[in-house]
Amino acid sequence: MLVETIDQDIKKAMLAKDDARLRGLRAIKSALLLARTEKGASDIISEETELKVLQKLIKQRKESAEIYHAQNRNDLYQIEKEEMQVIEAYLPQQMDREEITVYLQGIIAKTGATSVKEMGKVMGAANKELAGKADGKTISEIVKQLLQ
């Protein structure tokens, strides 16, 4: 279970005095605890929920990093990048653009979508099958490109 792994890694990071890793791990632990205590949630978090939490953390860090970079706040930008690297280590291996394109072509063939109007069908299947392996924004861009 991810929560147990994170707890062990926090202890290791504390012993190693690795502040960047510790910040990232604590962010993950906090988000997972929050997900576990949400209304309607059970004590055990599903793997799918864990992936969504990690992806949300990555997305938040990317957005913050972009803002800090645009404002020339390299100190804060660096902190966000370090935390993002720690969080990414707990996600499955990300697919590259070519792999995503090939996979999406298969989904388009399966769903029979022929135009951008049917993008919803493809996106529903793609987001489910590629959860944690590809960014939703990238998937959306490629699907639009393929359905034109």
Image (cartoon, helix red, strand yellow):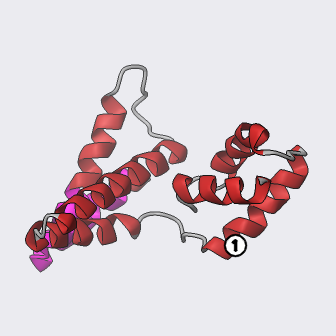
Q: Is residue 21 magenta?
A: yes
Q: Quadrant of the C terminus?
A: bottom right
Q: Would residue 10 be visible to someone looking at this image?
A: no
Tell which of 37 and 1 is nearer to you.
37
Name the residue carrying label 1: 99
The image position of residue 11, as x and y in percent, is 18, 66
Q: Which stretch appears magenta?
A: 3-26
Q: Name, please, the residue furthest toward the front.
A: 148
Q: Report the label total.
A: 1
Q: Is residue 34 left or right of residue 121?
A: left
Residue at 36% x, 58% y: name it.
58
Residue at 53% x, 54% y: name it.
137
The image position of residue 126, as x and y in percent, is 69, 50
Tell which of 66 and 19 is nearer to you.
66
The image position of residue 41, as x and y in percent, is 42, 26
Q: Is residue 64 magenta?
A: no
Magenta segment's dominant SS is helix
